[in-house]
Amino acid sequence: AAVPDNEQQLLLYAQDFRRLLELERGQRELLNNAYRETVVALARALESKDGATGAHSERVRRYATELAQAVDPTLLEEPSLEFGFILHDIGKIAIPDAVLAKPEPLTDSERRLLETHTVLGEQMVGDAALLRGQGARVVRSHHERWDGQGYPDNLSRDEIPIGARIFSIADALDAMTSDRPYRRAGPWDEAVSEIVRQGGAQFDPYVVDAFTEREEAMRRIYYEFNVN
């Protein structure tokens, strides 16, 4: 039987709509890939300004992603979180090189200047659609401490966004096991012991428990980057 004209027209509209959705999906994927490439390039450029050696942003992204999967896999459904991991120190663009790469201990005024990078970073990424939400909160709050002695807001315990609580452990792990302008890298096992010791003080004890569960997987990431 012949298809009535109105049904035929509806079918054509449905086909056109499906093609538009496929086109939009493809364009969105291209845009996301371009955005990610730009974010990664920016993070690598920032590493050279910060005096870091190696792929710090990629290591901490891998550590933090592994840890987030242990804490709550649904966190990673929000794309901004991963971008926040990569661009956590974006605010350091505004900090003088002489402070970032200084091999000696910072003065009090230099320390206060350095600590502004969290707020500056949030201001820089706050209007970026793919960093709104957890990503921007990681940028602002990754130096907060469980005991309330961190910065910039002196948040404590569950006041600290969960993404920032996760990332702070990944960042500390990489800081202790990587060369920095002011000291050489320390052994992996010592870094693990220090993170466990700081559970309930610097770090969320629940996230520390998740870290100990995933420590072997994170150690493999470390060796992937550090063994030729």
Image: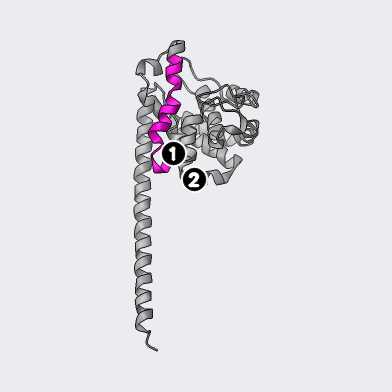
In front of the other: 189 or 102: 102
Image label count:
2
Q: Is residue 17 magenta?
A: no
> Dot 2 corresponds to which residue?
78
Gap between marks 2 and 1 measured at Cα: 10 Å
> Which residue is depicted at the point 48% across and 15% down?
183
Q: Quick check: 189 left or right of 83?
A: right
**118 over 72 or under it: above or below:** above
Residue 132 x/y as whole percent: 44, 41
Decide whether residue 114 is among the magenta residues: yes
Examine the image and state in which quarter residue 40 appears: top left
Q: Position of residue 41 (x, y in %)?
A: 35, 35
Q: Residue at x 47, y 38 (%)?
A: 135
145 on left or right of 49: right
Indicate the amino acid at tag 1.
Phe
Mark nearer the N terminus (2 vs 1): 2
Location of residue 188 by image quarter? top right
Determine which of the numbered discs, if any, sits on residue 83 in the image.
1
- Find numbered disc 1 in the image and state the secondary structure of the residue it sits on: helix
Residue 105 appears in the figure? no
Q: Please name the residue shown 36% across and 80% down the image.
A: 6
Q: Name the amino acid, label 2.
A: Glu
Dots 2, 1 in contact, CB < 8 A: no
- How crowded pointer 1 is (Cα within 10 Å; few <14, some 14-19, many 20+) is rated as many
Q: Secondary structure at mark 2?
A: loop
Q: Is residue 143 above or below residue 33?
A: above
Q: Tell me the quarter of the picture where residue 1 sits.
A: bottom left
**Label 2: how many residues lie within 10 Å, few (<14), some (14-19) or many (20+)?**
some
What is the x, y in percent for residue 69?
Answer: 57, 42
> In the rendering, which numbered label is found on residue 51?
none
Residues shaded magenta? 110-131
